[in-house]
Amino acid sequence: MIETHISGIKNAKLRNMFRKAIEYMIEDLCGKRLNLIINVRFGKTHPSIRGMCIPTDWESSRSPREFDIDISSKLSIKRQLETLGHELTHAKQFARNELVDYDNTTTRFRKKIYSSNTPWVKQPWEIEAMGNEEKLRKAFIKEHNIRITEYEKLL
């Protein structure tokens, strides 16, 4: 079961579309068996950051089940959906214990340890997330017959 909470979007139709996107993308990434809580906030982020995923129950669980995701409200709907797919990929990686951050100096991804000095574009967890962005967006749009232009007007 996926429990979703969305803030920063006032329009109910747009909020509902993102709720469906979260459920669709998480099911595509994880299947239906994981019970997750996904809190997505649309708002102001650092200019160089489109989004961010942070496990909120990391201390109480080795494999977190609750995540806060921030997405820049300055992005187009298309880019917001892609960013959502990217950040939900990280939620999947954390929830399956594939991705573990250790004290801001090292990261474990699928049993291999990486230094915090590893360039962003060479981090395999980011490569996977970037590879899922467009794929998840296109699959969601096709499955739900979404017309992006209709939603762009609601921003």
Image (tube, rainbow, N blue to C red):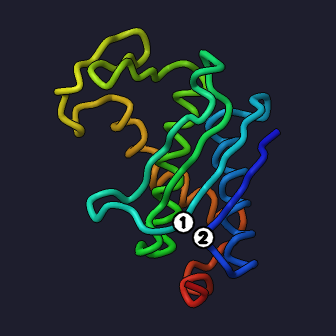
Coordinates of residue 154 in the picture (x, y in percent)? 61, 87
Secondary structure of residue under mark 1: strand
Checking the image for residue 42, the label placed there is: 1
Q: Relative to 2, does residue 62 appear above or below in the rendering? A: above
In the rendered view of the protein, which quadrant contains the N terminus?
A: top right
Secondary structure of residue under mark 2: loop
Residue 101 figure quarter? top left
Residue 88 figure quarter? top right
Outermost residue, bottom side: 153
Using a 10 Å C-alpha cutoff, classify the residue at mark 1 as few (fewer than 14 neighbours), some (14 to 19) or many (20 or more).
some
Q: Relative to 74, does residue 112 appear above or below in the rendering? A: above
Q: Which is nearer the eye, 37 or 143?
A: 37
- Residue at the (54%, 59%) spot, across then down: 137
Q: Relative to 151, does residue 28 appear above or below in the rendering? A: above
- Mark 1 vs mark 2, CA separation in Å: 5 Å
Q: Which is nearer the eye, 90 or 27?
A: 90
105 on left or right of 136: left
Outermost residue, top side: 111
Checking the image for residue 120, the label placed there is: none
Checking the image for residue 8, the label placed there is: 2
Residue type at tag 1: Phe
Coordinates of residue 100 in the picture (x, y in percent)? 45, 20
- Residue at the (41%, 75%) spot, across then down: 74
